[in-house]
Amino acid sequence: MLAKLILLFTITPIVELYILFQLADVTTPLTTVGLVLITGIAGAYLAKSEGRLILSKIKLELNSGRVPGNQLLNGLCVLIGGALLLTPGIITDILGFTLVIPGTREIYKSIIKRKFKRMIEEGNINIYFR
């Protein structure tokens, strides 16, 4: 797992930089910087507004006595998507927007649910109560 994370955090920035330099060659460096800034600002705003909406839905479900499992997954996706949107790069921006936008977020939620289900069935998840 650690090796995968090291690869992820070293290869991703190199690929992102390569794409940004290629984009700057095709357009202009100023256009590329502008694109990175605009997607960062728009992504932060979108993540903030979606996050607030999800928090209000979580509170509503908790107040009505329900477990907000689906909304917690929404919150996880928006949190990861927001972090990706603040990271400069084209690939991370595309991935971040798909995590923040409600329609495309469902794809990731189904993947996460399947992964959790498999981990529970295999006994890889331990829950401790105090």
Image (cartoon, helix red, strand yellow):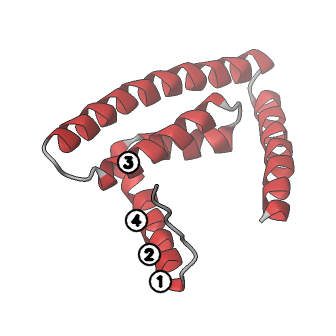
Disc 4 vs disc 1: Cβ atoms closer than 8 Å?
Answer: no
Disc 1 vs disc 2: Cβ atoms closer than 8 Å?
Answer: yes
Mark 2 nearby-residue class (10 Å; few <14, some 14–19, many ≥20): few
83 w.r.t. 35: above or below: below
Q: In the structure shown, which secondary structural element does the residue marked by tag 3 occupy?
A: helix
Front label number (4 vs 3): 3
* Residue annotated with mark 1: 121
Q: In the structure shown, which secondary structural element does the residue marked by tag 4 occupy?
A: helix
Disc 4 vs disc 3: Cβ atoms closer than 8 Å?
Answer: no
Instruction: State the CA–CA distance, disc 4 to disc 1.
Output: 16 Å
Disc 4 vs disc 2: Cβ atoms closer than 8 Å?
Answer: no
- The three-letter amino acid code for the residue at tag 2 is Lys
Mark 4 nearby-residue class (10 Å; few <14, some 14–19, many ≥20): few
- The three-letter amino acid code for the residue at tag 3 is Leu
Instruction: State the CA–CA distance, disc 1 to disc 2.
Output: 6 Å
- The three-letter amino acid code for the residue at tag 4 is Ser
Looking at the rendered structure, which numbered label has been put on residue 72?
3
101 w.r.t. 11: above or below: above
Q: Earlier in the sequence, mark 3 or mark 2?
A: 3
* Residue annotated with mark 4: 110
89 w.r.t. 49: above or below: below
**Residue 62 at x, y percent in the picture:** 22, 42
* Residue annotated with mark 2: 117
Q: Earlier in the sequence, mark 4 or mark 1?
A: 4
Disc 3 vs disc 1: Cβ atoms closer than 8 Å?
Answer: no
- The three-letter amino acid code for the residue at tag 1 is Glu
Q: In the structure shown, which secondary structural element does the residue marked by tag 1 occupy?
A: helix
Instruction: State the CA–CA distance, disc 4 to disc 3.
Output: 13 Å
Mark 3 nearby-residue class (10 Å; few <14, some 14–19, many ≥20): some
How many numbered badges does the structure rendering display? 4
